[in-house]
């Protein structure tokens, strides 16, 4: 078994937990269980915040890991990573808006944006797991360095 880095592994677990709780929350609202939905979606938000705190702390204090796989697929990884970062950013904004509209009982807006947010979040979590696998499981991670150098290679 490969030695997996602890902080990226923990943060990936939290983003997966966030996606799972979003799925459970979606199921609960379809079943009409509003209070359980609220609690579950709050938990999903907490899991996402824990992920972000771990990720941001690691990025600030340690750096990011460069892709350590073959050079011939690095461009594909980089494009995929940029797509994931875009999804994560959009998903975070949608998530905040979804939570706020839900808490404020702006249900017409919440019902429109909630399903879109959930779908974006599922793709974000899936691509995040794929990035983790490519960086630490399928290939040995490269150098730990600044965010710009880790993503773009310079």
Image: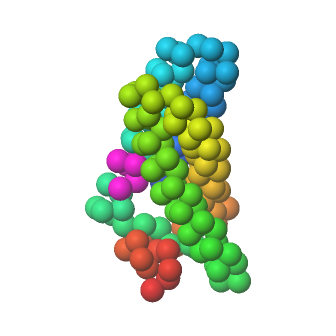
**Residue 1 in view here:** no
Residue at left offset 42%, top offset 77%: 148
Relative to 124, is 148 on the left or the right? left
Based on the displayed image, in which of its 4 quarters is residue 106 positioned?
top left
- Quadrant in which the C terminus is drawn: bottom left
Residue at left offset 67%, top offset 61%: 138
Task: Give 123 or 129, whichever is nearer the viewer.
Answer: 123
Above or below, 132 relative to 20: below
Q: Position of residue 115 (x, y in %)?
A: 63, 38
Relative to 54, is 90 on the left or the right? right
- What span is in magenta? 52-56
Q: Position of residue 69 (x, y in %)?
A: 64, 74
- Magenta span contains residue 34: no
Q: How many marks?
A: 0
Relative to 115, is 49 on the left or the right? left
Name, please, the residue furthest toward the bottom: 154
Task: Give 41 or 67, whichever is nearer the viewer.
Answer: 41
Above or below, 131 relative to 67: above
* Type of secondary structure dominating the magenta stretch: helix
**Residue 92 in view here:** yes
Relative to 23, is 94 on the left or the right? left
Q: Position of residue 53 (x, y in %)?
A: 35, 47
Q: Position of residue 39 (x, y in %)?
A: 46, 20
Name, please, the residue furthest toward the front: 108
Task: Give 51 or 72, whichever is nearer the viewer.
Answer: 51
């Amino acid at each position: 078994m490969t030695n997996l880095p602890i902080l990226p592994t923990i943060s990936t677990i939290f983003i997966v937990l966030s996606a799972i709780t979003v799925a459970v929350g979606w199921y609960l609202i379809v079943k009409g269980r509003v209070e359980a939905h609220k609690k579950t979606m709050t938990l999903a938000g907490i899991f996402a915040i824990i992920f972000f705190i771990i990720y941001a702390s690691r990025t600030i204090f340690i750096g990011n890991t460069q892709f350590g796989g073959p050079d011939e697929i690095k461009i594909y990884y980089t494009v995929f990573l940029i797509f994931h970062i875009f999804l994560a950013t959009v998903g975070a904004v949608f998530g905040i808006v979804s939570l706020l509209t839900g808490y404020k009982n702006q249900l017409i807006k919440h019902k429109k944006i909630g399903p879109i947010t959930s779908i974006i979040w599922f793709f974000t979590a899936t691509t995040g797991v794929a990035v983790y696998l490519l960086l630490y499981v399928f290939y040995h991670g490269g150098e730990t360095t600044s965010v710009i150098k880790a993503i773009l290679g310079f």
